[in-house]
């Protein structure tokens, strides 16, 4: 499993599985930028190379710009520009769209932006798990993805700023992680995952182990969706996690 270690900031364990999909349309990018550690997870809408292109372009551009600006919003705006250009040049019917969640992490701070339904949670030092995103929109419903803004207006992308002093880790994922939930649970998959994450992502568990366990759970999910997980273990001023 890939690992990025940024002294004084975090260890990031991340990986993707294709599961039963014909195409791996998830993409994760991790970058130690000049202003922030940036982690971007994108989930292309579909099961083809166009969805994969959209996810890869968006994750790479979003991570690069986020890491150099400490702004997930700027990262997603830059990704939108490049993805729109890709789609303008593509033959009809070969356009690609993708969801995205991107985190800019600095000592004690998190600047996160997202579009679509790719989720994120924080695991606090006291073992409680809290949702960080509110993915109330989806490319198949009200348009909200890296290429399309809300038709009815509103803030695009969604954004959350918070202090991370009481966070042990942050988890970013694509929605394949929640595919095992009953259909009633998928309507609010952020909160429906809290019991699973409390059990599987406790602060005393190693980040690499947590990421592997979450991907194993995703392999059993309904529909066998492609899935990406990034487990970000924060390093506090008191010392590194063991």
Image (cartoon, rainbow, N blue to C red):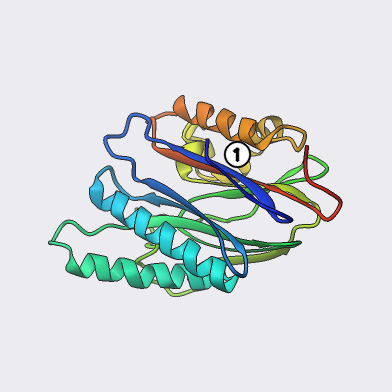
Instruction: From the top left corner, tell me how far across and down residue 90 is, in percent.
Output: 17, 63
Residue 129 vs 139, above or below: the answer is above
- Residue 100: x and y in percent read 46, 57
Taking the view exactly as shown, the residue that stands out farthest to the left is: 91
Instruction: Tell me, yes or no, if residue 200 can be seen here.
Output: yes
Q: Is residue 21 above or below residue 137?
A: above
Left or right of residue 25, residue 208 in this image = right
- Residue depicted at 81% across the width and 45% down the height: 125
In the figure, is residue 128 to the left or right of 36? Answer: right
Does residue 72 appear anywhere in the picture? no
Question: What secondary structure is marked by label 1?
Answer: helix
Residue 76 location in percent, x, y? Answer: 46, 67
Which residue is painted at 35% across and 50% down in the image?
Answer: 44
Identify the residue shown where x is 73% and y is 35%: 202
Tell me the quadrant of the picture where the C terminus can be found. top right
Depth check: 210 or 119 in front? 210
Residue beneath disc 1: 192
* Nearer-the-camera pick, 130 or 232: 232
The crowd level at tag 1 (other Cα within 10 Å; few <14, some 14-19, many 20+) is some
Q: Quadrant of residue 225?
A: top left
């Amino acid at each position: 499993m890939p690992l990025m270690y940024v002294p004084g900031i975090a260890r990031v364990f991340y990986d993707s599985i294709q599961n039963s999909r014909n195409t791996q349309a998830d993409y994760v990018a991790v970058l130690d930028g000049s202003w922030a550690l940036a982690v971007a997870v994108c989930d292309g809408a579909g099961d083809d190379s166009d969805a994969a292109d959209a996810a890869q372009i968006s994750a790479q551009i979003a991570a690069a710009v986020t890491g150099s600006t400490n702004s997930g919003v700027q990262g997603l705006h830059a990704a939108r520009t490049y993805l729109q250009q890709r789609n303008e040049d593509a033959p009809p019917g070969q356009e690609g769209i993708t969801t995205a969640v991107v985190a800019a992490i600095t000592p004690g701070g998190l600047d996160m932006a997202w579009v679509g339904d790719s989720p994120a949670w924080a695991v606090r030092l006291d073992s409680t798990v809290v949702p960080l995103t509110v993915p109330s929109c989806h490319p198949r419903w009200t348009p909200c993805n890296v290429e399309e803004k809300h038709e009815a207006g509103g803030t695009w992308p969604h954004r959350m700023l918070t202090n991370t002093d009481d966070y042990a880790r942050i988890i970013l994922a694509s929605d394949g992680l929640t595919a095992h939930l009953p259909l009633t649970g998928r309507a609010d998959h952020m909160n429906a995952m809290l019991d699973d994450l409390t059990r599987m992502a406790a602060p005393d568990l190693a980040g690499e182990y947590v990421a592997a366990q979450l991907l194993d759970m995703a392999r059993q999910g309904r529909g066998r969706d492609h899935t990406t997980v990034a487990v970000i273990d924060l390093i506090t001023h008191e010392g590194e996690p063991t």
